[in-house]
Image (cartoon, grey):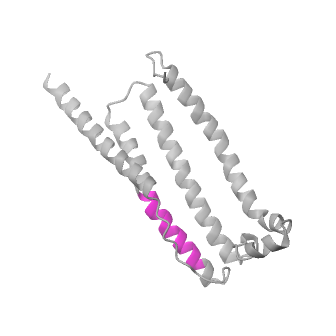
Amino acid sequence: MGTTMTDDGQGFRRLERIYRAIWIAFPIYVAYQVWQVLTLPDRLAGLDPALASCMQHLPIVTSFSVAGMVVYWTAFAIEMGIYAALLVLGHRVLARCAGGRIFVPDLVGSLRAIALIITIMPVFDLVLQNALLGLLAALGDMPFYTPSFDFDVTIFGVGLLMLTVTAAMGRAVAMREDQDLTI
């Protein structure tokens, strides 16, 4: 049997603990990603020479120009900021639901913001990735520019589904408010 949300709020307490764990893990994840980028040259040096020759065309951020590093780390910070914004919005939705404020305009607004970010993210990520690659090639930090057409249709679809559900919830909230006013 699946876990159900009980009236005593046990399910919300579990979700709150999960969010707290994610908030603790998020800076660790960001630090790990930074570490991966900064230690790539050392890890490549330890590879078999035949394998290392295949990897020589990977962009090595530590060998970028100062402008290239600024461009790369700015794009990295933007993406991590978007994920942090999604965490903040999701945590706000959880807090509102745990407090019993489910069918209220504030909750619908937060859900709509999450849905918009998720829907726009694949398009934004594709533009950001191509801009980053193009700028790095123009700065000479990458030998050539090959455009990326890696559009995440699944995430886009999830965002559209969330927008649909959010629109339905918004309609339900408006109908409930109208009903409350007429009684």
Give the total number of marks visible in the rendering: 0
**Picture coordinates of residue 128, whole percent (x, y):** 52, 68
Residue 174, picture quadrant: top left
Residue 134, picture quadrant: bottom right
Q: Residue at x 36, y 43 (%)?
A: 109
Taking the magenta stretch, the answer to whether it contains residue 125 is: yes
Q: Is residue 37 above or below residue 142?
A: above
**Picture coordinates of residue 18, whole percent (x, y):** 59, 33
Q: Residue at x 62, y 78 (%)?
A: 136
Q: Residue at x 45, y 22 (%)?
A: 5
Q: Tell which residue pokes out farthest to the front in this image.
A: 50
Q: Is residue 89 above or below residue 74?
A: above
Q: Is residue 17 above or below residue 85?
A: above
Of residues 103 and 155, the one nearer the viewer is: 155
20 with respect to 180 (left or right)? right
Q: Tell which residue pokes out farthest to the left in this image.
A: 182
**Picture coordinates of residue 155, whole percent (x, y):** 45, 53
Q: Residue at x 56, y 79 (%)?
A: 146
Taking the magenta stretch, the answer to whether it contains residue 175 is: no
Of residues 40 and 135, the one nearer the viewer is: 40
Q: Which residues are magenta?
A: 120-135
Of residues 52 and 137, the one nearer the viewer is: 52
**Picture coordinates of residue 118, whole percent (x, y):** 44, 52
Residue 52, picture quadrant: bottom right
Q: Quadrant of the C terminus?
A: top left
